[in-house]
């Protein structure tokens, strides 16, 4: 049996960083997905194991908290492990470290498993091996995943976009990391010069479909904490809470 | 001295492929950049060597030709090497292979080096070691890099977008791979169900700046070959030629 914690290395490529020469949140989210995919694949509950059982993993909630953003031309180490499993969900945590083992941040994610045909949740406890890898010895000292409140009438429209070819994943829905990209892009670049996004939390509610025009609504009481909501007409597709400092 | 040809491995991650479960052109372009960056870094003319001399590499032209797109959960091998060097430009070629060594496609790229302050071209022949790595023994059997003709008045507006935080790179200009993403996204997803983009060729003309609203104009005589032009007002920022089959 493999170790419960998987450890994966990524290079922060200079030509893919943001204007500050730092890794972007969508890039880090992409690395998290790659680490999660490898960790699961190596342990027998990855993408191909799932599809052979007519199932697929679906990301339900995620929170990323960074004390420091990795800089270009450095190596980022992502550790990931399974924390809990029940019928409907499994929670996976992540730690971000630099090459010297210094902690840069942490992340949490909550996954469901749906049937490829009916799109309904399947029983995660049925998956071979998953519970064997539960690891509760490694801390993830950030706030838990919460339900982000709906904005109702008190948000203002800050962005709108149509879901295009490059936005959609193998399920023909908006790719999990593209949601982060569209959320992060509502902020003016000037904000990134003065401060950093310390925490981003996302609730994936419904699926953003190809061709649909999505609106992003925003509300902030203090200009540091923002509630963002992606809507398809009146339907909430995805919510995010972004905390700057 | 290292071998002139560098060989790098990438995994086509299921959660990052398109709706067909195939690698996308922006993803492959990103892998090409990563391979080029590593190849140059290992041989002494990479990003950090350049910036220590107040210079930076700038992509001028690129062509990618694919016989077959890599599928999710497979390994892609990218080989890359330097073909020629003169005062103003160096040409770098790429070969794409699957894990069995089967050729999936090729690419060519043309790079200039500019001064970080004046933004003017610098003499590439001055760079230590670059000419030592010229390799002309490995074929890249695709058409050369050409100048894409300007559309003038015969194109129609097919897309427009504002350059946002996630679009810009360390030079505060539209990231080379984001150009590909915006070009590929002008096509309806239905086209990707029936055919493939066999060749994409790009001329990077001017820099797409943060906050500017860019238009994409298109012209096609046969619905298989498209000339696309990205414009900032009347200024041509970037042109592409896309060939489907």
Image (cartoon, coloured by chain):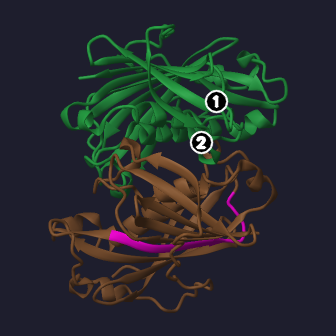
Chain colours: A green, B brown
- Percent across and percent down for residue A201 are 44, 20
Mark 1 — on which chain does it sit? Answer: A
Residue lying farthest to the front in this orientation: B153
Asked which secondary structure carries label 2, the reply is helix
First in sequence: mark 2 or mark 1? 2
SS assignment for the magenta stretch, majority = strand
Position of residue A34 in the picture relative to residue A76 (left or right): right
Magenta residue span: B58-70
Q: Which residue is mark 2?
A: A167
* Mark 2 → mark 1, Cα distance in angstroms: 9 Å
Confirm or deny contact between disc 2 and disc 1 (CB under 8 A): yes
Number of numbered discs visible in the structure rendering:
2
Q: What residue lies at 47% left-to-right and 41% top-to-bottom?
A: A31
Chain at tag 2: A
Badge 2 crowding class, 10 Å Cα cut-off, few under 14, some 14 to 19, many 20 or more, is many
Q: Is residue A217 left or right of residue A190?
A: right
Estimate the x, y position of residue B201 in percent, counting from the top left.
55, 72
Q: Image quadrant of residue A193?
A: top left
Q: Give the labeled residue for mark 1.
A: A208
Can residue B5 be seen here? no
């Amino acid at each position: 049996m493999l170790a419960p914690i998987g450890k994966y290395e990524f290079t922060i490529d200079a030509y893919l960083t943001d204007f500050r020469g730092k890794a972007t949140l969508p890039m880090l989210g992409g690395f998290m997905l790659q680490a999660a995919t490898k960790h699961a694949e190596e342990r027998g509950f990855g993408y191909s194991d799932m599809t052979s059982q007519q199932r697929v993993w679906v990301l339900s909630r995620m929170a990323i908290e960074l004390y420091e953003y990795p800089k270009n031309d450095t190596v980022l180490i992502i550790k990931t492990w399974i924390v809990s499993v029940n019928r409907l969900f499994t929670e996976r945590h992540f730690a971000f470290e630099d090459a010297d083992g210094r902690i840069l941040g942490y992340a949490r994610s909550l996954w469901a498993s749906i049937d490829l045909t009916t799109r309904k949740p399947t029983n995660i406890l049925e998956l071979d091996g998953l519970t064997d890898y539960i690891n509760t010895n490694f801390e993830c000292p950030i706030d838990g995943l919460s339900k982000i409140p709906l904005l109702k009438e008190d948000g203002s429209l800050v962005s709108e976009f149509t879901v295009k070819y490059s936005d959609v994943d193998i399920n023909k829905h908006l790719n999990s990391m593209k949601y982060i990209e569209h959320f992060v892009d509502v902020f003016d670049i000037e904000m990134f010069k003065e401060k950093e996004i310390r925490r981003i939390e996302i609730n994936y509610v419904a699926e953003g479909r190809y061709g649909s025009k999505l609106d992003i609504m925003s509300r902030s009481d203090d200009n540091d904490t923002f509630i963002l909501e992606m809507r398809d007409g009146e339907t909430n597709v995805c919510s995010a809470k972004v905390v700057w400092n």
